Image (spheres, coloured by chain):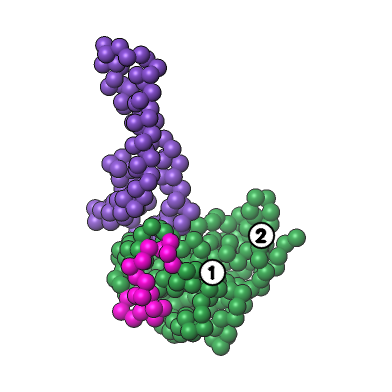
Amino acid sequence: MILIFCQYFIREFEISISQVTDILSQIGFFILVMMLFPLTLGPDPNKLSEYGIALVWIAAFVSVVPAYDRLFTDDYLHGFIEKAAHNDQPLGCYAAAKCLCFFLT
Amino acid sequence: MSSSELAHATLSFTNVTLFRANKLIFKNLNLNISSGEICLLNGPNGAGKTSLLRIIAGYLPISNGMMSLNGHIFEPLKSHLPIWYIGHPFGFHPNLSAAKNLSQIASMRKLSMFDEDRFNVIDFFQQPIRTLSTGQIQRLALSQLLLKSNRQKEALWLLDEPNSALDSLHCLALETLIEEHIEFGGRVIVAAHQPLCEHLSPQIIQLEAKT
């Protein structure tokens, strides 16, 4: 099971790096959101340092939201999930590898 | 069920009925397929050929009826009977190479790569799927049937329009492959608009379009 998990993970990683534009657009969106906070909160350093960490986390989560939609949709449309269903290993193995790779990239 | 029992088991579909979105697709369909038999599904677009293949593969639930394997209830995704559904979508990721896609499927099913490249896929093995033509992708999909395993002999092949984009040379290769599988004792169910394997005198299931 560990072997098949690693194979799924490698596949997901290769797909992620082949879709560089997706990663760049998430980073761009994150930077954009971060730039908006000083404009809306004002340039007060004390206020920014107080809220800064929380805002970074919120911006990071918000920037990955558009990618959630495609997390499993692509594989479903390409028929990969159906192929994985005929595997002896549980589909949870595939889902776990997918989620881990998504989190790391 | 032991391996030898599985090899000679008969797959039966009794009074299988399918509704999709409240529309009747087919009703009371009966089909028996044993080791070394081939079945052709005929019918116009929308008659339910692909749906029937997807039911047998376990991707669609039936609305009514019974599926059994040697008298036991047949659950395709849990059965030890190896099932290969080759139809659109093929399960390939467009950004990965043909080799990577095929080796992923092989490793998922604990099979090893083929020796004989009957569909000439080595020519484009390193190219991403998105750069391949429809015929090349179909040839790659059919190459899954060449992957090696001890359990492949009794496998059930479900082929959905397998020759729709193939040239005459590869159509011949496909027919030879099906013939060999039947001789080995395998089972094949094919949905096709073009004639295929007529010399093997297959049983024919005629599906009608519902208006």
* Chain identifier matching the purple colour in the rendered picture: A
Reply above or below: A12 against B99. above
User: What residue appears at the point 35 percent right and 42 percent down from the top-left corner?
Assistant: A24
Is label 2 or label 1 in front?
Answer: 1
Residue B82 lies in what quarter of the image?
A: bottom left
Looking at this view, name the residue that lies furthest to the bottom.
B199
Tell me the subunit letter for badge 1. B
Per the image, the residue denoted by label 1 is B160
Verify whether residue B101 appears in magenta.
Answer: no
CA separation in Å, label 2 and label 1:
17 Å
Q: Nearer the viewer, residue B18 or B162?
A: B162
> Callout 1 environment at 10 Å: few (<14), some (14 to 19), or many (20+)?
many
Q: Nearer the viewer, residue B36 or B14?
A: B36
Reply above or below: B29 against A27. below
Q: Picture coordinates of residue A79 (x, y %)?
A: 46, 57
Q: Nearer the viewer, residue B60 or A24?
A: A24
**B23 lies left or right of B158:** right
- Residue B22 visible within the image: yes
Tell me the subunit letter for badge 2. B
User: Magenta residues, as a range?
Assistant: B114-132
Q: Picture coordinates of residue B194 (x, y %)?
A: 60, 78
Looking at this view, name the residue that lies furthest to the right.
B211
User: What residue appears at the point 38 percent right and 23 percent down from the top-left corner?
Assistant: A36
- Residue B32 visible within the image: no
Disc 2 secondary structure class: strand
User: What residue appears at the point 41 percent right and 59 percent down from the top-left corner?
Assistant: B94
Disc 1 secondary structure class: strand
Q: Picture coordinates of residue B171 (x, y %)?
A: 50, 81
Per the image, the residue denoted by label 2 is B25
Reply above or below: A85 against B208. above
The rendered magenta stretch, by its main secondary structure, is classed as: loop
